[in-house]
Structures are given as C-alpha cells and as structure tokens.
C-alpha cells in the first residue's frame, strides 16, 4: 500500500504540487516546501522532496544524542506549523501540466513564445549544462530577461549557443515553483 502511494506520487510528478512557502518559527521566517498537504524540505537538488515526517523517522533510528533530540524537536515544530501553510497555498497554479510542461498560461506568464515547448525536466538538464558552476539559480526570471542577461560577459551565450527552444525549457525550470 505504501509502495502504491509512492508510485502515485511519482506519477503525479512534483511539477505541479511541490510548492515553496514560508512559516514563522520562534520569530524567524523559515522557508519550507509542501508536496500536496505534506510539509518538508527540498534541499540541494530542489526536485527531491523529503517530508519532515521521514526526516524525523530517520533521526529516530540513530542513537539519541542531545543534538539529535534538539533536531527532532525542531522538525516536529516545523511539521506542525507547516501543515496549515501547506493547506492554505494555491497548489494548482495552472502554469504546468502534470508532466511539467508549461501551459499557455504559464508560457504567457514566463514570457516564453507560445510555439516553443517548455519542460521542467529538460530545463533542469540545460541548467546543469550551461549555468551550474558560476552562480546559483535565477528563480522566476522570464525568457526575455534571461535572453538579454546571458549575452553579457562572462557568459556570452547568444542564440547560436542557446537557441530559443533550449532557453524555453530553462525558463520553465526557473519558474517551476511560481504561483
Ligand atoms: C562563466 C560563469 C557563468 C556562467 C556559466 C553563467 N553565468 Fe550568469 N552571470 C555570471 C556573472 C559573473 C554574472 C554577473 C554577476 C552576478 O550577477 O552574479 C552573471 C549574471 C547573470 C544574470 C544577471 C544578473 C542577475 O542575477 O540579475 C543572469 C540572469 C544570469 N547570469 C543567468 C545565467 C544563466 C541562465 C546561465 C546559464 C544559461 C548563466 N547565467 C551562466 C557568470 C556566469
């Protein structure tokens, strides 16, 4: 049954339902991710989501040092605070379909010419090929803004190196969490 649930999550894809949101914990604003109504984090590779529940379970399987106990306490607080945040957010932005392709609404919002395909997974590969190494992701940037920016030194990427179709995928990736 658990396996079936996982399969279901995998087939739904993260594209539409993994959303970044913010909670206030001890006066500090903490950024968390919600997959459906499940709160958690999506560190490093932003497409890999780990629920707080799973993180707590992992920690509980280790010898309980004071440091680990403190971590568990923090995660439990996030989990509790995250639940209403996850329920309140607009989960269905309509910017992507279930396969991570930008819809007409999404393309319009991101400034991507409508005749181009714009897919999150393909965009991630473009990002890893051309952008990683120099600076962190540029989230929420539109197509025309990035087209101009990457022409500048030291990037000097023009249309012959990164054609519009390639850029369209990249822009889908940059806007994957946008509401
Ligand atoms: C050779 C290193 C290098 C690579 C590779 C690179 N950049 Fe840059 N980029 C820079 C530097 C340096 C700046 C100017 C300083 C800054 O803003 O970080 C910059 C600035 C930018 C800016 C404008 C500044 C801003 O954030 O508003 C954007 C947008 C941008 N890069 C996007 C990209 C994208 C998209 C890629 C991949 C297609 C890419 N860069 C690849 C080094 C690089």
Image: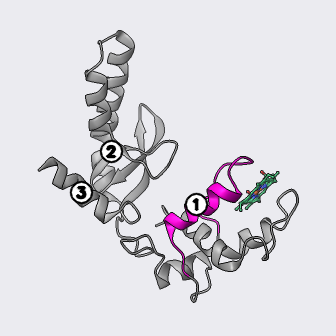
Q: Residue at x 25, y 29 (%)?
A: 57
Decide which of tag 3 and tag 1 comes sooner along the chain: 3
How many numbered marks have been drawn onto this rendered protein structure? Answer: 3
Query: Which quadrant holds residue 169?
Result: bottom right
Colour scheme shown: one colour
Q: What residue do we see at 71% from left, 48% from top?
A: 135
Residue 138 visible somewhere in the drawing? no
Q: Which residues are magenta?
A: 117-141
Q: Are marks 3 and 1 in contact (CB under 8 Å)?
A: no
Side of 118 where 20 appears, left or right: left
Tag of residue 82: 2
Residue 125 numbered mark, or none: 1
| 34 or 50: nearer the viewer | 50
Secondary structure type for disc 3: helix
Image region (quadrant) for ligand 1: bottom right
Compared with residue 69, is residue 30 higher up or lower down, i.e. above or below? below
- Image coords of residue 19 (percent x, y): 41, 57
For label 3, the residue is 7
Q: CA distance from mark 2 to mark 3?
A: 24 Å
Task: Decide: is 95 above or below 78.
Answer: below
Label 1 or label 2, whichever comes before in sequence order: 2
Q: Residue 123, position in %: x, y?
A: 57, 65
Residue 147 shown left or right of residue 156 in the figure: left
> Residue 37 bears which disc, if any?
none
Image vertical order of residue 114 relative to residue 61, above or below: below
Magenta segment includes 159? no
Task: Identify the element where label 1 is drawn.
Answer: helix
Q: Residue at x 66, y 57 (%)?
A: 129
Q: Nearer the viewer, residue 46 or 95?
A: 46
Dot placed on the residue nearer the N-terminal end, 2 or 3: 3
């Amino acid at each position: 049954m658990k396996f079936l649930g996982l399969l279901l999550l995998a087939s739904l894809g993260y594209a539409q339902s993994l959303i970044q949101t913010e909670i206030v914990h001890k006066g500090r604003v903490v950024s968390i991710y919600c997959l459906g109504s499940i709160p958690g984090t999506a560190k490093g590779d932003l497409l890999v989501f780990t629920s707080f529940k799973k993180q707590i379970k992992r920690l509980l399987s280790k010898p309980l040092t004071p440091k680990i106990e403190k971590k568990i306490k923090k995660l439990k607080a996030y989990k509790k605070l995250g639940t209403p945040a996850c329920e309140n957010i607009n989960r269905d932005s309509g910017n992507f379909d279930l396969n991570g392709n930008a819809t007409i609404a999404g393309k319009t919002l991101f400034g991507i010419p409508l005749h181009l395909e714009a897919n999150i997974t393909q965009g991630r590969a473009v990002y890893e090929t051309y952008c990683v190494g120099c600076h962190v992701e540029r989230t929420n940037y539109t197509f025309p803004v990035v087209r101009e920016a990457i022409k500048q030194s030291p990037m000097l990427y023009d249309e012959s190196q990164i054609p519009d179709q390639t850029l369209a995928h990249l822009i889908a990736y940059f806007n994957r969490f946008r509401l």
